Image: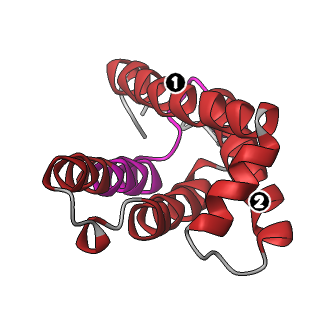
Amino acid sequence: MTRPVDSGVIFIARIALAALFLWSGVMKLVGYAGFVGYLQSKGVPFVQVAAPIVVAIEALGGLFLVLGFKIRPLGIIMALYAVATAIIGHDFWNITDAAVQHDMVIHFWKNIAIAGGFLLLFVTGAGRISIDGARAPRSGLGL
């Protein structure tokens, strides 16, 4: 069980992560052809299957974060997604331009840090300010 202050902090963390993924998912959807082209340029196999899955993960994942719905399994899925996008999208080891490589290193480690945040959500759960929290049984002792 989390304290009320903990639930508030978890809620803020969920909203911060959701903003990133909701925005990114919507932008991919709005510029879908460009996004598909980007995936093709990165050598992603089965782009016609991968692209809608990516958009769904980002948009639905963001929505679930806001609502606090199924946060523990979502935390694992989103952590794996963040690591996969770090490896595929920010492959600094393949970049020869020093300035671009530096930028990619930063983005790579940013994604790894985001994965860490999702792993923390896996451990903590959604907190009380969530659908998951509303559905959780409460102790009669106020714990």
Q: Residue furthest front?
A: 97
Q: Can you identify the residue that label 2 sits on?
A: 51
Front-most of residues 143 and 76:
76
Q: Residue at x 30, y 73 (%)?
A: 94
Please identify the quadrant where the N terminus is shown: top left
Does residue 131 appear anywhere in the picture? no
Front-most of residues 3 and 106:
106
Please identify the quadrant where the C terminus is shown: top left
Does residue 99 appear anywhere in the picture? yes
The kind of residue on which mark 2 rests is: Ala
Front-most of residues 97 and 28:
97
Q: Residues within 10 Å of mark 2 (few under 14, many from 20)?
A: many
Where's residue 128, x and y in %?
54, 28
Where's residue 122, x and y in %?
46, 56
First in sequence, mark 2 or 1: give its number. 1
Instruction: Tell me which segment is drawn in magenta.
Output: 111-135
Q: Secondary structure at mark 1?
A: helix
Q: Residue 101 — which label? A: none
Q: Can you identify the residue that label 1 sits on?
A: 15
